[in-house]
Structure formats: C-alpha cells, structure tokens
Image (cartoon, rainbow, N blue to C red):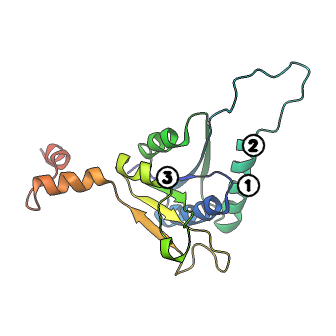
Amino acid sequence: MKDVVTVGVDGTPQALAAAQWAAHEARLRQSRLRLLTAWQPLTARPRAPWAPEPPHWPDRITQEARATVESAEPGVAIEVRLVREPPLEALIEAAEQADLLALGSRGLGPAARFTLGATGLDLVPRVAIPVVLVRARHDRPTTEEGSSIAVGVSLRAARVTRSIGAEQEPPAERKRAR
C-alpha cells in the first residue's frame, strides 16, 4: 500500500465535497491526503515585464480545498500537487502513486444521479485503483451516512479476473507468491 488518498480538485462544489470525503477516508485509513490540481495553460503568450503577476488560480483552488479539509478533518496529513498538464493525464499518473482516487461528480439530475462525467468515464478504465465519485450535498456533510457516492472499478482488473477464471490467482499474485 502507498498510504495515499488522492483527490482531484478544480474549485467546484463537487470537488470540495470530494476533498472532504477523501480527507475522512484518509483519516480512517491513517493515510496521507493528496490534493491534486491540474491545468493546461490557455496561452503560451509571454507576459510583459512591467505587467503585474496575475493571481495564480490553481494556488487559490488548492488553498480553498486545504482550508475546507483542515476544518472538516483536522490532523490529516495533506500534500498539495499542482500539475501543468491535461487533468486526465495528471489523474492517471496520480493513480499510480495512490491507493484510492476521489473526484467530484456532477450528476445531471435525479435519473442520472451517479452519472460519470467525461473525466470519470475516461479515467476509470485506465487506472488500476478504485475511483470514488462524490456529489456535493448542501443539506448534510459529505461524510454523513447517506451521502451520494459511486465507486468505479478498473475494467482492466475485471477482464484479467474473467480471463483467468475464478479458480486461478491473477498472474501478478502468482509471481509474488513464488
């Protein structure tokens, strides 16, 4: 185990709900919480030397998430990662260094409560760890029983299990046992 719970934060209420849930989970697992914000610069145009430095919005997003987490789950060890690359790529890389990945989910309504967003749909089949999707709830804390949580499991792991049969161990497990 890596003892890391990673959450993708983008400044939305859903991402803050996911950060609170992930912090609670990290506390229960006695793991570190990693707040990850990834972005692609919109322009490569250089700034004029006399122009003031614009506020760095990824810092603001992670500061808000950190404050939310620290007030909800004091004492949880928090790391912050700011990554200048496409969010999907950053999340896939982060999954390699974590035991669990949490994301905010924007359901489209009651019928689509646990609908995976575009990032979730692209991410789940590409990672080998559980992905937890958390919806923002305004009427109760995200850690309270009854919160809206959906779990996505890697499709690659499911294919390996099916292809080798229920009686056999996965190849990686057989290698470790020898």
Which residue is the site of mark 1?
A: 64
Residue name at image x 11 percent, y 62 percent: 166
Is 148 situated left or right of 163 in this image?
Answer: right
Which amino acid does the dot numbered 1 rest on?
A: Glu
From the top left corner, tell me how far across and down residue 54 is, in percent. 83, 34
Residue 57: mark in rendering: 2
Residue 34: mark in rendering: none
Check whether the beta carbons of the residues at disc 2 and disc 1 lie within 8 A of each other. no
The quadrant holding residue 96 is top left
Q: Secondary structure at mark 3?
A: helix
Is 5 situated left or right of 154 in this image?
Answer: right
Disc 2 versus disc 1: nearer the observer: 2
Closer to us: 20 or 109: 109
Which amino acid does the dot numbered 3 rest on?
A: Ala
Disc 2 versus disc 3: nearer the observer: 3
The quadrant holding residue 84 is top right
